[in-house]
């Protein structure tokens, strides 16, 4: 029911808010709307249609919602705020790179090689490049991802850090296709 909505009906109004919690194992979570009101159910299939398998708690999100017999449910993800914050805990490895410098880096298509959530890191391969890219869990969380799985297609902004190439921001894979080279 993602038809047009003039704002008068309950069919598909836009809502912005933050993720209260999301469990990729259970396949769902909830969003707290900015203006208050009931929690909004976010199903993993709706998130996958946006190009992500997970989302971090507290991530800012904009969705289309539908009222159902059980309450509000997200039907489409419009956007997830992926603003990088190099002062976020765990981001010391980035050194003196600013948010503006991060935003100026190109988004490159990549595939997750492996990621261990308990260890808090993993690696990805950028298409057409031999060197692995380090993925830190705080970069994932700061980019709105709770986790990534091996083989998952993502887009990354890469910085040459003290220990080699590392992702400083992660986005859905399709974002790399929309960014001019």
Image (tube, rainbow, N blue to C red):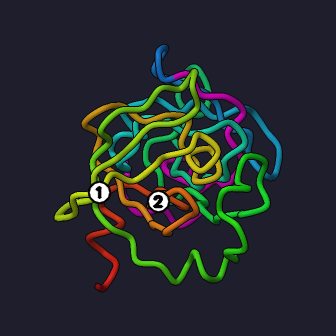
Q: Which mark is residue 5?
A: none
Tell me the residue that label 2 is attached to: 164
Instruction: Answer whether residue 87 is magenta in the image.
Output: no
Residue for point 36% across, 59% down: 155
Q: In this orientation, which residue lies closer to the viewer: 100 or 7?
A: 100
Q: In this orientation, which residue lies closer to the viewer: 120 or 181?
A: 120
The picture places residue 156, in percent across and down from the top left corner, at 41, 61
Instruction: Answer whether residue 16 is magenta in the image.
Output: yes
Question: Decide: marks 1, 2 in contact (CB < 8 A)?
Answer: yes
Judged from this view, the residue extending furthest toward the right is 36
In which quadrant will I find the C terminus? bottom left
Residue for point 56% across, 44% down: 136
> Which region is colored magenta?
1-23
Judged from this view, the residue extending furthest toward the left is 128
Residue for point 57% across, 21% down: 118
Q: Residue 131 carries which label?
A: 1
The picture places residue 172, in percent across and down from the top left corner, at 39, 55
The picture places residue 21, in percent across and down from the top left corner, at 67, 28
- Mark 2 burial class by Cα count in 10 Å: few <14, some 14-19, many 20+: few
Residue for point 46% across, 49% down: 134
The picture places residue 51, in percent across and down from the top left corner, at 35, 48
Judged from this view, the residue extending furthest toward the front is 163
Q: In this orientation, which residue lies closer to the viewer: 147 or 161?
A: 161
Above/below status of 169 relative to 28: below
Asked which secondary structure carries label 2, the reply is strand
């Amino acid at each position: 029911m993602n038809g047009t909505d003039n704002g008068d009906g309950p069919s598909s109004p836009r809502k912005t808010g933050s993720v209260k919690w999301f469990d990729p194992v259970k396949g769902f979570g909830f969003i707290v709307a900015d203006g208050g009101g009931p929690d909004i159910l976010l199903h993993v299939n709706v998130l996958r249609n946006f190009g992500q398998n997970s989302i971090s708690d507290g991530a800012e999100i904009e969705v289309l919602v539908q009222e159902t017999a059980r309450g509000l449910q997200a039907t489409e993800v419009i956007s997830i705020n992926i603003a990088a914050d190099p002062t976020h805990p765990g981001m010391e490895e980035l050194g003196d790179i600013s948010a503006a410098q991060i935003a100026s880096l190109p988004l490159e298509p990549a595939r997750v090689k492996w990621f261990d959530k308990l260890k808090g890191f993993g690696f990805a391969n950028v298409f057409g490049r031999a060197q692995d890219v380090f993925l830190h869990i705080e970069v994932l969380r700061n980019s709105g991802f709770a986790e990534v799985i091996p083989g998952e297609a993502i887009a990354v902004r890469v910085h040459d850090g003290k220990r080699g190439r590392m992702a400083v921001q992660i986005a859905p894979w399709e974002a790399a296709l929309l960014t001019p080279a």
